[in-house]
Image (cartoon, rainbow, N blue to C red):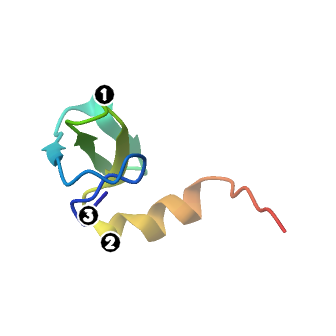
Amino acid sequence: MKNGICAKCGAKEVCVVPQTGVEMAVNVGREMAYMSYYICTNCGYAELFVQDSEMLQQIAWKYRRIRRD
């Protein structure tokens, strides 16, 4: 999706909607990791991504990981 191609239907109709509100954030202590929606305007499929990649380490430290082997 981040490459502008829908992961579901393959269309090149992807828009990004950055969010700054708490309703779209992950609490990582004193800071918030804000999310962005990537939405296909062809089929409606949507994905969320953390806006600031530096927050990923803090998320990994704070939250339980799910592992599949």
Q: Which residue is mark 3?
A: 52
The residue type indicated by label 3 comes to Asp
Q: Residues within 10 Å of mark 2 (few under 14, many from 20)?
A: few
Q: Earlier in the sequence, mark 3 or mark 1?
A: 1
Query: Circle 3 — which element?
Result: loop
The residue type indicated by label 1 comes to Glu
The image's mark for residue 47 is none
Give the quadrant of the C terminus: bottom right
**Coordinates of residue 15 in the picture (x, y in percent):** 15, 46
Q: Give the Cα distance between marks 3 and 2.
A: 5 Å
**Coordinates of residue 40 in the picture (x, y in percent):** 25, 41
The image's mark for residue 54 is 2
Does 44 sit left or right of 4 as displayed? right
From the viewer's perspective, is residue 69 above or below residue 47?
below
Q: Residue at x 46, y 70 (%)?
A: 57
Q: Which residue is mark 1?
A: 23
Does 14 sit left or right of 25 as displayed? left
Does 51 sit left or right of 29 as displayed? left
Give the quadrant of the N terminus: bottom left
Q: Are marks 3 and 1 in contact (CB under 8 Å)?
A: no
From the viewer's perspective, is residue 49 above or below residue 42?
below
The residue type indicated by label 2 comes to Glu
**Coordinates of residue 27 in the picture (x, y in percent):** 41, 43
Q: Earlier in the sequence, mark 2 or mark 1?
A: 1
Q: Are marks 3 and 2 in contact (CB under 8 Å)?
A: yes
Q: Residues within 10 Å of mark 3 (few under 14, many from 20)?
A: few
Q: Give the Cα distance between marks 2 and 1.
A: 20 Å
Q: Give the Cα distance between marks 3 and 1.
A: 16 Å
